Image (cartoon, coloured by chain):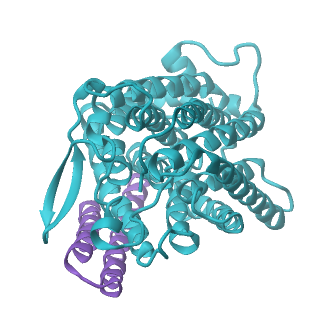
Chain colours: A cyan, B purple
Amino acid sequence: MTAGVLSETGSAICLLFIFLIPLASAGLALINTGLGRSRSAAHTMLAALCILATAAVAFAAIGFAVEGYAGRAAYAVMLQGKPWNWIASERFFLRGLGFDGGRAALAALFGMMAAGLAAMIPLGSALDRWRLGASVAATAVLAAWTYPLFAHWVWGGGWLAQLGATYHLGSGFIDSGGSGAIQAVGGLTALATTWILGPRRGKYSPQGMPSAIPGHDAVLVLTGCLLAWIGWMGLNSAGAILFTGAAWGEAALVAVNTTLAAGAAGMTAAGITRLRFRKTDASLAANGFVGGLAASSAGCAVLPPAAAILTGIVAGVLVVYSVEWLELHLSVDDPGGANSVHGVGGLWGVLAVAFFARVPGGGEGQWVAQMAGVGTLLGFVFPLTYGVNALLNLVYHQRVAPDGERQGLDLHELGAGAYPDFLTHNEDAWQR
Amino acid sequence: MKLAGLMLLVSGWIIVVAAIALLQTVTAQGGFLVAGMAVELLGLIVVFRAHLIRRRGAER
């Protein structure tokens, strides 16, 4: 669905949008840090930085060779006389890519930022127990293989993107800003990581009842939401221009939809917690807000604003109830809510396109293309990411030693705490 | 049990891909695609159960 050559103005504006994407990563880093314990705060921020750095290098070295860009060299197999484009055949280390302001070069830069954002998501679910080295190793695998492979199918001219041209399924799989390619891939990897690591010590009683371990700084969490909002407008706008063929002037619609979905989701989550608990829960409202951002990405360029609000409301409901369901009934210890916010929110965003999108040409069969994307995320990406992370865990154990968890990751892995001058929480001292 | 769940997930995906590749009409493709996703859902339930059982076993 990508269009032709970008004008100089379009190229420059797209570049500016891409420069905003690190704000989304910075927002997620602050959210993850705030939702974790104070004794692991410096470790979480350092892990976020290491993850972004590793993702950029791994994507540039290998990832872009796997992802490629529509219209460039790729491997395809023929099924029933129709081409199925599986993987790009670019050269490693971005060789052969002309940095001339063209779409492919911008897509490579976008991919470096997006890989970092996707790799940041599992950090939220693995807080307070993920070794720094293990988070770096898992990021390298995600940025070099898992993320680029699915991104090729969606954005690199792969078989999901071509479903419209080859099988007349609407406009093919639509995911402008990455609800599926970034958020759901990251969210499903977060679920795999959570299972491999197991719950934090003291999270569940022997009877399986969870205990609340609140985050240590709500201000960090809410500041992170504000930064993520700006970053997401850049992410969705750049994605819409590069992968959905939107003109740069349509960025206003993209930003409106992004804001409406996030606002509706945040207010819905805040309202639900107010009704249920008589007090508004700041962390769940923040999770709802980011869940709305995650859900907004897929259809940001093809949804009417009213549909973006509806998408956000549903995302807010899904995030609040799935956080509770995963923790209470499925024993998934996810301190940052990454599975719900990015996994459930992202999958819902992909489906919302099937329900609400205004697709050129009427879009008959668009819902089949979107469902095929969801089916691929659950049936291919999840087993793949689970498998590679389980293998990684065999050769390099991912969970910190019990002593390290008791002591806090700051002292155990970094040798110094984030807040050396004061004790921030009595419960922290008691649990040491 | 966990492996069985993961195999079910992959099997569901193969049904999804096969439905698109082999069937002609959107209705038929959609029908088989929903069936494939039902298999995936079953796989997801099995994987979740496998983890619940393993965790509760570890607690005992």
Residue A202 spot, x, y in % from top left: 57, 44
Image-based side of A319 in relation to A238, left or right: right
**Residue at screen point 67% across, 62% down:** A312
The residue closer to the viewer here, A417 or A430, is A417
In percent of width and height, residue A118 lies at 47, 41
Query: Camera-side residue: A422 or A344?
Result: A344
Q: Is residue A21 left or right of residue A142?
A: right
Q: Residue at x 58, y 25 (%)?
A: A45
User: Could you tell whether A364 is left or right of A277 in the image?
Assistant: left
| Numbered disc total | 0
Residue found at x 25% / y 37%:
A394
Q: Residue A214 appears at what percent x and percent y?
A: 69, 43
Quarter holding the C terminus of chain B is bottom left
In the image, is residue A365 above or below residue A22? below
Residue A419, picture quadrant: top right
Q: Nearer the viewer, residue B54 or A310?
A: A310
The quarter of the rendered structure image containing the N terminus of chain B is: bottom left
A294 or A66, nearer to the observer:
A66
Residue A202 visible in the displayed image: no
- A314 w.r.t. A62: above or below: below
Residue A300 image point, x, y percent: 59, 56
Vertical position of residue A2 compared to residue B31: above or below: above
